[in-house]
Amino acid sequence: MRSDIFHANNTAQPATQLGITLQHSRCVKACVDGEVYARQGSMIGYRGQFSFEVKGQGLGNLVKRFATGEGVPLMSCRGQGEVWFADNAAECFLIDLDPGDALSINGKHILVYEPTLGYDIQMVSGAGGFVGGGLFNCVFQGQGRLAISSHGQPIVIPVSPQQPVFADSDALIGWSAGLQTSIVRTQSFGSMLRGGSGEVAQVRFVGAGFIILQPSEFTFGAPGTK
């Protein structure tokens, strides 16, 4: 049988080491001897012996998730072998965190991460009255690897104390957690009465760090769902 689909770039090769890697730009592979945590519904295939169970998020995060609607619906992937994860053909990226790092990520962009990392649901400072009562993110800390998704090639924008950056909340993937945030409204009441510009308010970032944006305001359900 002959076809371009059987090209080596499309063929899963035997794993050579444990950990989370990119199968290609739109799929993540985890070679596991133990467990990893992933977004529910994101697994697309595996080989080996695995069990997939709902993962508890701790009482604090469970209460926050019910109160805010934010967080990550997680599953534990436990066993030995290889597992593949994807998010509606979104672009996938790996981030390695070291001790002392803190990364704030929108929960809908989290794909899979190592159990050496932990997260806490935190309200974005200055966003208490924004869109239904708040804007919340998952702040990851620890040492380990995290895989995230982006609908389109992401844009990483440096932030400096001298030059704040503004972003649409629907395009935000995440940011370095040390940045200061606030909400800036950029549309006048008169403009809203005339139909509005579609850009009511943005998140303002001040400090030293970076933000990660996707070139999309993707709303096709929740990433990882089927």
Image (tube, helix red, strand yellow):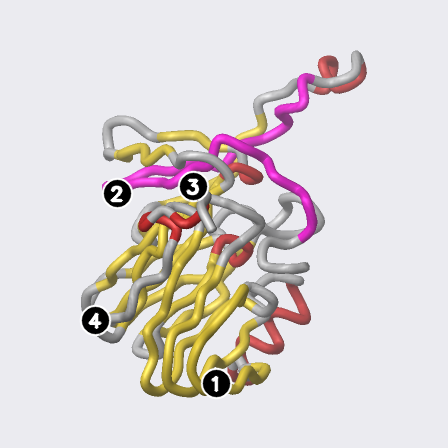
Residue ID at (39%, 83%): 35
- Tag 2: amino acid: Gly
> Vertical placement of 6 versus 142: above or below?
above
Which residue is under mark 2?
209
Q: Secondary structure at mark 3?
A: helix
**Range of the magenta residues?**
197-221
Task: Name the residue furthest front.
Answer: 1
Q: Is residue 45 visible?
A: yes
Quarter residue 216 falls in? top right
Q: Secondary structure at mark 4?
A: loop
- Mark 4 → mark 3, Cα distance in angstroms: 25 Å
Which residue is under mark 4?
16
> Disc 2 or disc 1, which is closer to the eye?
1
- Tag 4: amino acid: Thr
- Tag 1: amino acid: Phe
Percent x, y of residue 68: 64, 63
> In the figure, is residue 195 to the left or right of 129?
right
Q: Earlier in the sequence, mark 2 or mark 1?
A: 1
